[in-house]
Amino acid sequence: MAQTERERTLAMATEIAWALWRGMSPDYKRRYARVIWDQFQSRLQGEAMATSSLGTFVNSACSKLGVVSLGRRDDLGTLDGILNSGQDRLVLRLLREETALIVVKVRLMNEERRAEIEALMDDYAQEDALREAQEGGALDGLSD
């Protein structure tokens, strides 16, 4: 497999894993919080070994990982393209043989997403604090 083809296939496998991770129920993740990443890796690898069809892989992984919705609305076009790419064998092979790498990539994507959310929350908190300070100052001026 050429390096560029491998990278493309790895990106497809990672996109599927990312969609599965994002679609997992928060309750499921909390219930298995101590072992969730090991379980995620094990399920991905096991389901990839059990089939030669990406569609079957995704359906089975969804049911075993507590996936309530596969990815997000923005992901649907990408996922559809992957599932209909005719690259089932190559993608499943990477999901079998390089599961740890794919899961590390998903973990990094998840940490990046969390950092973005935390930064947004910090921005909102600062805006709220500024707004409250300005409103408080405006009210102080009215009492004179």
Image: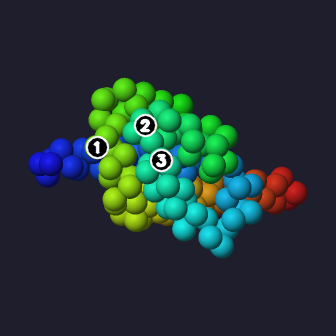
Three-letter amino acid code at disc 3?
Ala
Q: Nearer the viewer, residue 96 or 108?
A: 96
Q: Position of residue 78 (x, y in %)?
A: 39, 33
Q: CA distance from mark 1 to mark 2?
A: 10 Å
Q: Quadrant of residue 15?
A: top left
**Is disc 1 in contact with disc 2, using a CB cutoff of under 8 Å?**
no
State left or right for residue 59 relative to residue 109: right
Packing grade of label 1 (10 A; few <14, some 14-19, many >=20) is: some
Q: CA distance from mark 3 to mark 1?
A: 14 Å
Q: Nearer the viewer, residue 37 or 128?
A: 37
Q: Quadrant of residue 12?
A: top left
> Outermost residue toward the front?
50
Q: Quadrant of residue 54?
A: top left
Compared with residue 19, is residue 77 higher up or lower down, i.e. above or below?
above
- Res. 105 mark: none
Q: Earlier in the sequence, mark 1 or mark 2?
A: 2
Three-letter amino acid code at disc 1?
Leu
State left or right for residue 103 relative to residue 129: left
Which of the image's four quarters has the C terminus? bottom right
- Res. 50 mark: 3
Q: Do we see residue 53 in this rendering? A: yes
Residue occupying the point 72% across, 62% down: 30
Q: Nearer the viewer, residue 119 or 87?
A: 87
Packing grade of label 3 (10 A; few <14, some 14-19, many >=20) is: few
Three-letter amino acid code at disc 2?
Leu
Q: Which residue is mark 2?
A: 54
